[in-house]
Image (cartoon, helix red, strand yellow):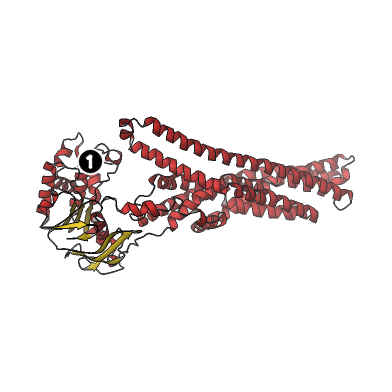
Amino acid sequence: MSGGKDAKIMDSRTERKPDGKSGAERRSAGKIMWSLIGLVKPLLHIMALAILLGTAGYLCAIFLTILAGKALLYGLSAAGGPLAEAGLLAGGAASGAARACFIVLIVLAVARGLLHYAEQYCNHFIAFKLLAIIRHQVFAALRRLCPAKLEGRDKGNLISIITTDIELLEVFYAHTISPVAIAVLTCGIMTVFIGSHHVLAGALALLGYVTVGLLIPLWNGKKGGSRGMEYRMKFGELNSFVLDSLRGLDETLQYGQGEVREAQMLERSNLLAGDQRELGRLEGNQRAVTNLAILVFSFGMLFLSLWLYSRGEMDFAGLLTSTIAMMGSFGPAVALSSLSNNLNQTLASGERVLSILEEQPLVEEIPEGAGADWNGAAHFTGAEAERVTFAYEDETILKDFSLSMEPGKIIGIHGASGSGKSTLLKLLMRFWDVQAGSVRVSGEDVRRIPTGRLRDAESYVTQETHLFHDSIANNIAVGKPGASREEIVAAAKKASVHEFIAKLPKGYDTEVGELGDTLSGGEKQRIGIARAFLHDAPFLLMDEPTSNLDSLNEGIILKSLREESAERTVVLVSHRSSTMNVADVVHEMETGRVS
């Protein structure tokens, strides 16, 4: 266990799955959908409009065929012949009714197109608006969970949740919620309409709609629900593997592991493709069963109507209308049935997103205005850990640990890897909370200090400096947003990195590349130190700040720390004895105790 990585021990053992829940804890499809629907509240009025437009559009499409049948019937009545009495109108009246039907058909056709466009516009407006809201909420949740819940977390899966999982929710919001409501309304209206000709016809229609729109999707969803989650999980794992392979490309080439990584990637891709094929097979099966059910119920309505007509319980107009209405009204139910083809993956994505949104942080931040009235950034009086006990799961790192840090001094903490040095700094930053005892800064328990004020009073230099894909100036300015170029240069000089930056073709405007991989470890570390100097906090925490530096640059950095210590308190963590030479007092740590 290394001092800088001790926080990851717990995460590697207790980290929840990327979907946020174990298999036993996974919520049902209904609960997932209900939770996702709850996010629509700000846009309910637009959703209601989309449902009304969609229902009206489907009814226009259905009655196109029904009126076409009516027009044919009236045409036969006007022409005379054996079916003349079927239209129930004679002569000129039947001919006028036929013309009226054709006019209404044109109106319905135009209305169908306009209504469908308006419904789709509303649905997609809702979908993309909600995706932006959800993405914002997910980033806010990740901000709330870090760093305790995110250290050691599978970054590829997190990226998959933030990108593809959220994008898949577009299917739910644009093509699921309103289609369900539209199907229920449309099928209900058509059941009443067909039932007006005969109650048995209405009952058969209702049975057909329920079978196609509900029973078949439930049957298919039950078979493929776990497959959808497995697919999303493996997709996230493949993302992580690819990301890991790209980051380790130099080592892969150096040690001739290219073929091994390629074989592993191919194996993972094949497993993913296998799940995708299974999902495709389930989708094909559902389509086949759905089409068969539509045929059965359509011909069932025809035979039922013929039987009722032969018994004199339904006239010919009712026979024709009921049959045409049944055959032409499965559209909403089929749309509902088709949802389950992609719904397995969509619900799995929804579960993963909801789990991130609902996950509780290990450390709750204290907002401004809550907690103690504290101003340690302006009046720093030192810090202390008193009888602190802290453990990651069952691994006790600090036990009954006490340490006082006087203001205006450089406090050196020396010890072997795994002795709890890095953990102490994270407790001072309140990345974690102690299980027993207390950590105080300027006389106040960090659990009562507003988090923003605490971080303003502290600068923290980690072992591994993360650089963003941006200019060097902007990377240093992370320590103080809005800092002037003069302030950035002054901080860089203190960190012994100004001369290096000045020699670059674009100077401080030079892009550092992804993860800062265009710079050496020592250069990145000095930029991280420059950030801390720019932050200009009275309490400076430095975790192995010179581990990647040569002796010359180490000396320059330590000299800057000595000069800065008159204005700030420095806690200097290192396992290197040479680094401790600058400290006013050195504490030796061993297995969570100090001497």
Q: Mark yes or no: residue 204 visible.
A: yes
Q: Where is residue 262 in the image (x, y as percent from the top left)?
A: 41, 32
In the displayed structure, 201 sits above or below 470; it is below
Q: Mark yes or no: residue 125 visible.
A: no
Between residues 536 and 404, which one lies in front from this camera angle? 404
Residue at disc 1, secondary structure: helix
Q: Where is residue 177 in the image (x, y as percent from the top left)?
A: 57, 52
In the displayed structure, 79 sits above or below 358; it is above
Q: Where is residue 511 in the image (x, y as percent from the top left)?
A: 26, 38
Q: Quadrant of residue 585?
A: bottom left
Tell me what residue is drawn at x 69 percent, y 55 percent: 188
Tell me what residue is drawn at x 74 percent, y 56 percent: 192
Tell me what residue is drawn at x 43 percent, y 35 percent: 265
Q: In this view, does 416 lie to the left or right of 205?
A: left
Q: Quadrant of residue 357?
A: bottom left
Between residues 57 and 305, which one lies in front from this camera angle? 305
Task: Identify the residue position indicated by label 1 in the image.
Answer: 521
In the displayed structure, 362 sits above or below 129; it is below
Between residues 374 and 233, which one lies in front from this camera angle? 233
Q: Position of residue 171 (x, y in %)?
A: 53, 46
Amino acid at the residue labelled 1: Gly
Q: Is residue 33 left or right of residue 508?
A: right
Tell me what residue is drawn at x 46 percent, y 50 percent: 131
